[in-house]
């Protein structure tokens, strides 16, 4: 309990960004905000709707500045295949899905979220899941499919 | 240019986005921490701060901004933030 005595201490502030969700898919979402963000910034997205809750680790991949607009920035965020750490929630996490993944939210998401059937190599439909389970998408894979580290996937 | 005319998801529920902003720790004690940040903070605002050290040790703090002052660091505008440590939420290894 003496963190202040640790050598080479580094810090990161978790800052809440006010904004309006514009669009969302299984791989990411876009947001209108007045806060300037830079590409590559990491963060957490939590969305609680009437029919679905989503909690994802995300990275800012694109920022469009719109001079003169009421809300100045359009920010696109990419969901990352990283488990959401504890103590990051700003909302009541008891109402969230167990893993905070879109796949786990599929049942109650209905048509609100873009969910795609996952196919085996032969083209056989394995079951309905979020696009996170697809090999060419970002996100969580199902338990039957081992998750390949992001660094390994980026090498290909 | 986005080809889609309509959004695929509409929610009247709550949307929260949090981002991690790296800060340089200047001084730290059990009750106060001073950092240099790339963005200013409103005095009185409360936030979470994650501190890490060599070896993977990390702690999450609940802090309140008590002061914010712009200053030039290496020719770039930065902000010196004084923060009061309200509580420590967790501590562990990465």
Image (tube, helix red, strand yellow):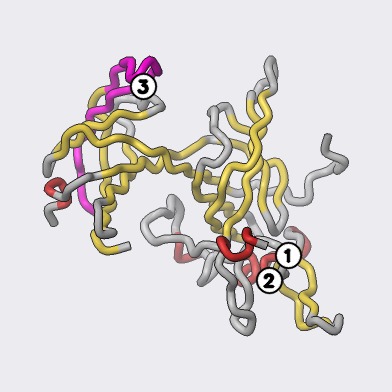
Residue that label 2 marks:
A133
Q: Chain of mark 3?
A: B
Mark 3 falls on what kind of element? Answer: strand
Determine the CA span between mark 2 and mark 1. 9 Å
Q: Chain of mark 2?
A: A
Badge 2 and badge 1 in a common chain: yes
Q: Position of residue A50 (x, y in %)?
A: 64, 57
Residue A139 quadrant: bottom right
Give the magenta-colored segment's residue range: B68-88
Observer-nearest of A63 and A135: A135
Residue that label 3 marks:
B78
Residue A15 quadrant: top left
Observer-nearest of A83 and A101: A83
Mark 1 falls on what kind of element? Answer: loop
Are the two marked residues, 3 and 2, in contact with CB atoms closer than 8 angstroms?
no
Residue that label 1 marks:
A136
Q: Position of residue B83 (x, y in %)?
A: 23, 33
Q: Residue at x 31, y 16 (%)?
A: B71
Q: Position of residue B70 (x, y in %)?
A: 32, 16
Determine crowd level at label 2: few under 14, some 14-19, many 20+ residues with C-alpha closer than 10 A: many
Q: Residue at x 70, y 41 (%)?
A: A22
């Amino acid at each position: 309990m003496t963190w202040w005595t640790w050598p080479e201490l580094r810090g990161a502030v978790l800052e809440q960004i006010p904004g309006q969700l514009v669009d969302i898919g299984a791989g990411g979402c876009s947001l209108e905000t007045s806060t300037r963000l830079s590409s590559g910034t990491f963060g957490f997205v939590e969305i609680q709707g009437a029919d679905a809750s989503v909690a994802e680790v995300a990275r800012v991949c694109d920022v469009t500045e719109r001079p003169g607009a009421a809300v100045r920035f359009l920010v696109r965020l990419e969901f990352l295949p990283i488990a959401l750490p504890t103590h990051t929630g700003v909302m009541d996490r008891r109402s969230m899905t167990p893993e905070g993944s879109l796949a786990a939210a599929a049942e109650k998401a209905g048509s609100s979220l873009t969910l795609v059937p996952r196919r085996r190599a032969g083209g056989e439909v394995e079951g309905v899941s979020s696009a996170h389970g697809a090999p060419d998408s970002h996100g969580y894979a199902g338990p039957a499919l081992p998750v390949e580290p992001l660094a390994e996937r980026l090498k290909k | 240019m986005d080809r889609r005319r309509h959004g695929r998801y509409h929610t009247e529920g709550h949307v929260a986005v949090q981002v991690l902003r790296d800060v340089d720790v200047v001084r730290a004690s059990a009750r106060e921490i001073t950092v240099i940040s790339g963005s200013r903070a409103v005095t009185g605002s409360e936030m979470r701060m994650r501190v890490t050290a060599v070896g993977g040790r990390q702690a999450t703090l609940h802090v309140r901004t008590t002061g914010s002052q712009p200053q030039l660091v290496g020719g770039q505008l930065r902000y010196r933030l004084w923060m009061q440590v309200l509580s420590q939420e967790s501590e562990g290894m990465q």
